[in-house]
Image (cartoon, grey):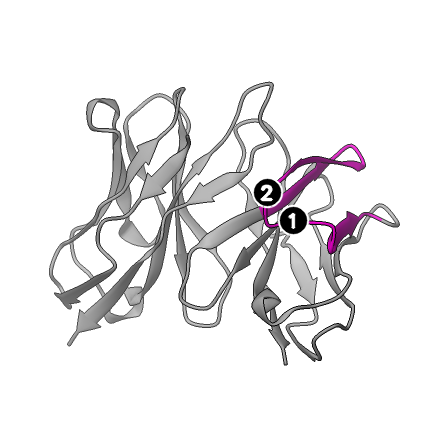
Amino acid sequence: EPEVTQTPSHQVTQMGQEVILRCVPISNHLYFYWYRQILGQKVEFLVSFYNNEISEKSEIFDDQFSVERPDGSNFTLKIRSTKLEDSAMYFCASLRGGQETQYFGPGTRLLVL
Amino acid sequence: AQSVTQPDIHITVSEGASLELRCNYSYGATPYLFWYVQSPGQGLQLLLKYFSGDTLVQGIKGFEAEFKRSQSSFNLRKPSVHWSDAAEYFCAVGTHGSSNTGKLIFGQGTTLQVKP
């Protein structure tokens, strides 16, 4: 069964550093998402991406964040200058469209020190 | 505003007992509803979903959920819980329609503990 993959599984970084989280969505999917889950809290929507552009972003997704689909298979989330409060599990998800299921990757646990 | 409420943060049941996890939503149109399960350190696995039609939906691992429009609820049930069901359960509403992007809005989650 096709699945969403994410790399790395864990990342530790220093405050102020840039990080790039990578995702490979399911190949025939058209909609891509990033969510985050701060430890002990609920899963929160960050951004959705369709037709090579951001279709919606949350208040969390400020200028420090960016997304890209550089080569038609990878979908990346970049945090330009990490803060302590960016420590969380980041999930990538993809959706074919319509009445379909959104599939989640296993997540990247980011720790900012 | 769209929202999902899971009133129970933590539930403990005995193995073999029945289970009901509550979920209430607020959404302007007919919602797309989902239940996901998350085991410790793992990603989110879809248990079941409701888009339209029969309001009682069956999912994996013996779970079912019933959509009740009048109560704005989508409660998850299982007749007999197994120790391996211990996990965190998230209810979510999926936004849809021409002005929406399909994002999911999650509830706070319910942690299920199973006693032997």
Label 1: state its secondary structure: loop
- Seen in the picture, residue B11 relative to A52 is either above or below; the reply is below
Q: Residue furthest right?
A: A71
Number of marks: 2
Measuring from the top left, give residue A36's x and y in whole percent. Answer: 55, 57
**In 3D space, how far apart are the residues under numbered discs 1 and 2 (Cα atoms)?**
5 Å
Residue ID at (60%, 61%): A90
Q: Nearer the viewer, residue A16 or A51?
A: A16
Question: What is the span of residues highlighted in magenta in the rendered image?
Answer: A46-69
User: Looking at the image, do the residues carrying marks 1 and 2 touch, with CB atoms under 8 Å apart?
Assistant: yes
Pointer 1 residue: A61
* A2 is within the stretch colored magenta: no
Specify the amino acid type for callout 1: Phe
Measuring from the top left, give residue A98's x and y in whole percent. Answer: 57, 26
Residue B7 seen by the camera: yes
Residue ID at (23%, 69%): B113
Pointer 2 residue: A58
Instruction: Please tell me the numbered disc located at residue B93.
Output: none
- Seen in the picture, residue A96 relative to A18 is either above or below; the reply is above
User: Mark 2, chain letter?
Assistant: A
Residue ID at (34%, 31%): B26
